[in-house]
Image (cartoon, rainbow, N blue to C red):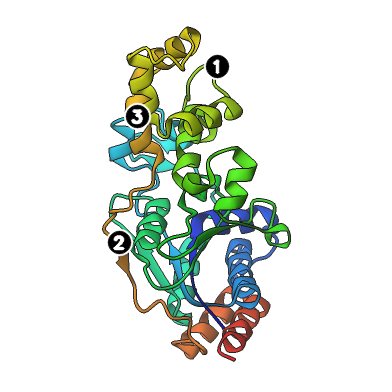
């Protein structure tokens, strides 16, 4: 068994399960359980294929943190279902499944983690930053977390499942550098800076008008960071053409806050539910059996329990 810490971007994974599987998968009372079953099967595949010794399912305590929206009100604004409650737009049949997922994780004995006022991305970033012993694998369908790849003090890579587990990609600094044109020695932070310049409509990040991915990567390779690039533009740096300086200075208000909004908060005050060691058997077998029967999770739970047993061998 590889002594690896797997950090799961839980919402990313159960959202993908929800959309990948039909909502005709239901409990006896008619409640859809497609996200629950898909998420359980995803964990089983992670345990079987990646064989981590440690695993933490990371959660959103706040999917749209105030420290980000105070700086950039457009951050994820298009996803807000209830502006007064700052509630995310989530399918009606997914919302009731999340507590079931959490109940199942607790009964199996798999650790969960969150940080009050922070997103799961921040939890993952903080746990990655803390880890000084084992290699880290971040499992997500969100490219934002590419910023966490590193080689030291322990390797950290991203298992990107944006196209499903069967087409999962293992991305280290070398792969991120090759794909996005950022320096390999600074691939993680370089990706975050490039993404800030390029922008991302799915997160409400406007980016710099007229600066695409390739140009953004070239600028970050040359100047190293968003802050250094903005300073160069404002000081009239000789290596920045006038047209580019004007684009950057026109976006100064955005660029001055973009790093805080885009970069994960590695100092997030993470709270973990319990030990992160992957158990060889469920913590509460009776509760697991009860949940499996109540929610019609049989095959998925059986595969998860079998994966736990195999992971110990």
Residue 56, quarter of picture: bottom left
- Specify the label residue 227 is tagged with: 3
Say which residue appears at 42% left-offset and 52% top-offset: 121
Residue 228, quarter of picture: top left
Question: Are the residues at dot 2 and dot 3 in contact (C-beta closer than 8 Å)?
Answer: no
Left or right position of 207 against 226 = right
Say which residue appears at 58% left-offset and 84% top-offset: 311
**Residue 254 at least partly seen:** no
How crowded is the residue under tag 1: few (<14 C-alpha within 10 Å), some, or many (20+)? Answer: few
Q: Which residue is mark 1?
A: 210
The answer to whether residue 77 is above or below residue 8 is above
Q: Position of residue 282 (x, y in %)?
A: 49, 87
Work out whether mark 2 precedes mark 1 in sequence or the reverse, and give the earlier one.
1
Q: Which residue is mark 2?
A: 270
Q: Position of residue 308 (x, y in %)?
A: 57, 84
- Mark toward the viewer: 1 or 3: 3
How crowded is the residue under tag 3: few (<14 C-alpha within 10 Å), some, or many (20+)? Answer: some
Question: Which secondary structure, mark 2?
Answer: loop
Residue toward you, 131 or 187: 187
- Mark toward the viewer: 2 or 1: 1
CA gap, disc 2 and disc 3: 28 Å
Q: Position of residue 182 (x, y in %)?
A: 54, 39
Say which residue appears at 37% left-offset and 20% top-offset: 232
Question: Which secondary structure, mark 3?
Answer: helix
């Amino acid at each position: 068994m590889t002594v690896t810490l797997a950090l799961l971007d839980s919402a990313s994974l159960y959202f993908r399960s929800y959309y990948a599987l039909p909502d005709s998968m239901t409990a006896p009372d008619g409640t859809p359980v497609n996200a629950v079953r898909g998420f359980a099967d995803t964990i089983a595949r992670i345990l079987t294929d990646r064989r981590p010794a440690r695993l933490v399912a990371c959660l959103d305590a706040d999917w749209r943190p105030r420290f980000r929206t105070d700086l950039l009100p457009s951050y994820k604004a298009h996803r807000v279902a209830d502006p007064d409650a700052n509630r995310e737009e989530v399918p009606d049949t997914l919302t009731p499944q999340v507590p079931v997922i959490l109940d199942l994780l607790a009964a199996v004995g798999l650790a969960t983690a969150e940080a009050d006022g922070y997103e799961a991305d921040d939890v993952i970033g903080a746990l990655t930053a803390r880890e000084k012993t084992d290699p880290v694998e971040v499992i997500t369908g969100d490219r934002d977390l590419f910023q966490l790849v590193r080689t030291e003090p322990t390797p950290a890579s991203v298992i990107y499942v944006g196209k499903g587990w069967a087409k999962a990609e293992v991305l280290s600094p070398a792969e991120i550098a090759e794909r996005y044109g950022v320096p390999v020695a600074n691939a993680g932070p370089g990706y975050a800076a490039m993404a800030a310049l390029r922008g991302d409509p799915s997160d409400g990040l406007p980016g710099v008008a007229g600066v695409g991915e390739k140009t953004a990567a070239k600028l970050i390779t040359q100047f190293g960071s968003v802050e250094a690039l903005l300073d160069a533009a404002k000081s009239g740096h000789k290596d920045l053409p006038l047209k580019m300086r004007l684009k950057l200075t026109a976006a100064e208000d955005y660029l001055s806050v973009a790093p805080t909004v885009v970069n994960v908060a590695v100092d997030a005050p993470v709270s973990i539910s319990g030990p992160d060691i992957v158990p060889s058997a469920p913590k509460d077998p009776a509760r697991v059996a009860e949940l499996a029967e109540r929610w019609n999770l049989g095959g998925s739970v059986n595969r998860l329990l079998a994966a736990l047993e195999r992971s110990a061998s």
